[in-house]
Amino acid sequence: MIKIKDVSFSYEGNPKNALTNVTLEAARGDFLGIIGQSGAGKSTLTRVINGLVPHYYDGVFSGDAAVGGRATLESSPEELARSVGSLFQDIEGQLFASVVDDEVLFGLENFGVPRDEIESRVEYALAAAGISDLRTRAISTLSGGQKQKVAIAAITALKPEIMVLDEPTGELDPQSSRRVFETLRELNEKHGVTIVVVEQKIMMLCEFVSRLAVMNGGRLILEGPVASVLKNAEKLEDAGVNIPRVTTLALRLREHGLYDGEPPANIPEAARMMRTAVHASL
């Protein structure tokens, strides 16, 4: 589905690599979270996936990248957009219409979707994003979380195989952030959409994604199932990533011989870990 091999890239005018020898794969149906401190190369990596690098951003590119079987160097971002839906950090700059219904229609009409399919696509996308009740609302009256969902619905209506989201909850409160991630999980689990999401909130990622990729200084330093990545506490800290407190607790319990399982990624798993630890201490 997504295959990136030995990709390096430096932006024009900046000799320092934004990406260095990055190799990453995501299979159909994956829910991949990308994390790392500011400047680690996360956004540039998403631009490689959707073809904006190197087509829209000038610079020096090397390596190979393919998405849905298409080499990104040989396909324009417009061509890739038929299978890759992208959500950027600036949501306000990605919304074009004044009403929710028109926003979802906008992409369908621009991609030439047959008229007899449009209504069913709009209904499908609004339902998938959980905002069917907002269809006639003015976008200016919506909350930040609702606007995020409108943008997700507009992408979903195009039925992409892959969705790439760059910090979709950066400006949202915890409750709105959770609602956005619940929407993404539903698209992933019920509709089979492959999700790649850049996010700073590691606890949120650990609860929803199936795999984590950790960037540091333009390099991919860790990648794999959430539990296996969380074991590498020192590497995560060196990369400027604050590991979840439940993971820190697991490591301390392991030091005292009270727990030898996988580090928990969320509160329910932490609760099960504590029951195991309490039983071991008796």
Image: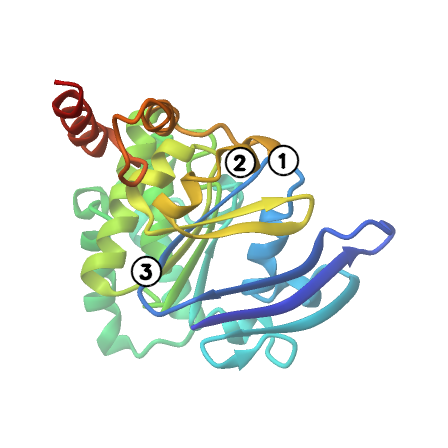
> What residue type is disc 2 on?
Leu
> What residue type is disc 1 on?
Ser
**Which quadrant of the rendered structure holds the N terminus?**
bottom left
> Eyeballing the image, is 114 above or below 157?
below
* In the image, farthest residue toward the top: 282
- Mark 3 lies on a secondary structure that is helix
| Numbered circles on residues, count | 3
What is the C-alpha distance between the residues marked 2 and 3? 33 Å
Which residue is found at the position 68% from the left and 49% from the top? 218
- According to the image, label 2 marks what residue? 236
The part of the image, by quadrant, that contains residue 234 is top right
- According to the image, label 1 marks what residue? 38
- According to the image, label 3 marks what residue? 156
Using residue 33 as the reference point, say whether residue 89 is left or right of it. right
**Which quadrant of the rendered structure holds the C terminus?**
top left
What is the C-alpha distance between the residues marked 1 and 3? 28 Å
Residue 103 in the image, given as x and y percentages of width and height: 37, 53
Can residue 123 be seen here? no
> Eyeballing the image, is 127 above or below 203?
below
The part of the image, by quadrant, that contains residue 45 is bottom right
Using residue 231 as the reference point, say whether residue 174 is left or right of it. left
Using residue 60 as the reference point, say whether residue 281 is left or right of it. left
> What residue type is disc 3 on?
Thr
- Mark 2 lies on a secondary structure that is helix
